[in-house]
Image: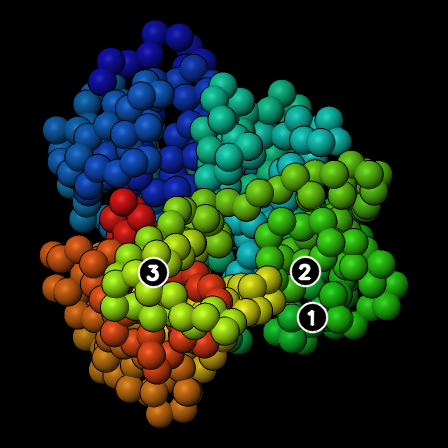
Amino acid sequence: MRKSNHPHKKAVHFIGIGGIGVSALARYFLSKGNIISGSDTSPSELTDQLKKEGIKIFIGHKPVNIAKGVDLIIHSAAIKKDNPEIKKAEQLGIPFKSYAEALGELAQQYKTIAIAGAHGKSTTTAMASLVFIKAGLDPTVIIGTKLKEFTPPAGGNNFRSGKSKLLIIEADEYTGAFLNYSPFGAIITNIDLEHLDYYKNLAEIKKSFLKFIGNIQYGGILILNKDNKNLFSLRNKIKKIGQKNNLKLYWHSVTLDQRSQAQCNKLRKILKVSGEHNVSNALGVYTLAKALNINDKKIFDALSEYRGAWRRMEYRGELRIMNNKLRITNENSIIHNSSFIIPVYDDYAHHPTEIKATLAGIRQKWPKSAIICVFQPHQEKRLKSLFKEFAGAFDDADTLILLDIFKVKGREETKQSVNSQKLAEAIKRKSPINVLYLKSANWRTKNLSKTLKQIIIQNQHKSVLNQHKSALVIMMGAGDIYKMTDKLIK
């Protein structure tokens, strides 16, 4: 890589550039005229797009990827000190920072709003961004998902370049990343048992969130979800921090506050995304916007236009089943040689709380449809720590197809005593839903579409399609299951 000749431009290399957050930060640096390169372990749709935008992409982490002309290296949280590119940077004396450290330094240059919480960060960040754009505040946005509204030249799906000094970011608690930020305003959606490969227990997670609250700028604004028991249990400690730092604290509730019921009812009517969890996310954004004197019309107009985000209950296409043996009872008639069209959705949910909320939202929106959930667990440690919760998370599904666990490289230190087959057995013992387990070989090397169609046809007499007029498939998980969604709808 050549070194930048411009005194204010830098040659910046990103390790783990295929990550959704790191790629957004790379796009930010690119938008400022810097020379950008990056590496990742494998190509993806995201790295292909970054290439088209002018970023040099290397596949594989190799010392040769780091040239003497590099001014700065930014790496994802997954990158360890023994990474060959980090070692090369040390040899060459090139400074390197984590994604969170770099974003924290960047955020100091802006009036920053940070969205934190175990669940709902991306959706809430997206909603807040659209409201502030609608209000004419022209924010820069760095988000952990892709939005249809963020397209070049204003942004690149997970990034938007604004002209104001307002920055909206998604603040992740994993590895304490959000402790690098000192925002003037923040929303905390909830606190939950999550990232237990880093945190020891819930008490440690709560302490981390209290530290985050303590980092909010003096006189700043904090929006909190009263409906989340873990967060509300900290109310006295939060109040003390608020008094010390002169914070403006706003608690909101979908269920406990009669004053907000009119807003909640309106949100239920206008939102295109389903579920009470999304009503709660939107109410948090509404509360923040009102605290900053944005009028109701602009808030509700923006929220009504939100179409959802990448892998957040995202409609992907249709699964068409044609079989002359399939018999579907439709009121008083029996249809032979049937063509059955099933919509396919994709969702990032990988924690029991997220799974329950997503499936409940689907059941609420499509009460008469059969829900066929295909789930890929994410991390053995998460499944082991929350095994009981996972076993009770799928009650709103009619059929559950479990795939093998997606193991995250660098985050699975010890072999756990759980697997997807054991989860399937546990669910069968306590739930009446139809549960099937597919080994990896049965879905990675064969045609998933064919396998799923066979399962649906074989089980239709005793389960979902014989009892419902319609059905839908939800592909769920934080691993690489989204790649299978592409194959399913082809």
Asked if the residue under mark 2 is in contact with the one under mark 3, i.e. CB atoms within 8 Å, the reply is no
Could you tell which of marks 1 and 2 lies nearer the N-terminus? 1
Residue reaching furthest to the right: 259
Which amino acid is tagged 3?
Answer: Ser
Dividing the picture into quadrants, the one containing residue 137 is top right
**Residue underneath mark 1:** 227
Choose between 125 and 403: the one closer to the eye.
403
Q: Position of residue 275 (x, y in %)?
A: 61, 62
Instruction: Work out which quarter of the rendered image holds the N terminus and state it.
Output: top left
Mark 2 lies on residue? 280
Closer to viewer: mark 3 or mark 1 = 3
Residue 338's tag is 3
Q: Residue at x 50, y 38 (%)?
A: 147
Q: Residue furthest top?
A: 5
Residue drawn at (19%, 75%) of the image? 415
SS for callout 1: loop
Residue at 28 percent across and 52 percent down: it is 488
Does 439 sit left or right of 261 as displayed?
left
Q: Residues within 10 Å of mark 1 (few under 14, many from 20)?
A: some
| Mark earlier in primary sequence (3, 2) | 2
Q: Are marks 1 and 2 in contact (CB under 8 Å)?
A: yes
Direction front: furthest residue: 333
- The answer for how far apart the CA atoms under marks 3 and 1 are is 46 Å
In the rendered structure, which disc, 3 or 1, sits on the residue that comes first in sequence?
1
Can you give x and y, in whole percent of width and height, for residue 3 in the image? Answer: 28, 14
Contact between marks 3 and 1 (CB within 8 A): the answer is: no
Q: Position of residue 470 (x, y in %)?
A: 47, 64
Q: How much space separates mark 3 and mark 2, taking CA atoms?
A: 41 Å
Type of residue at label 2? Ser
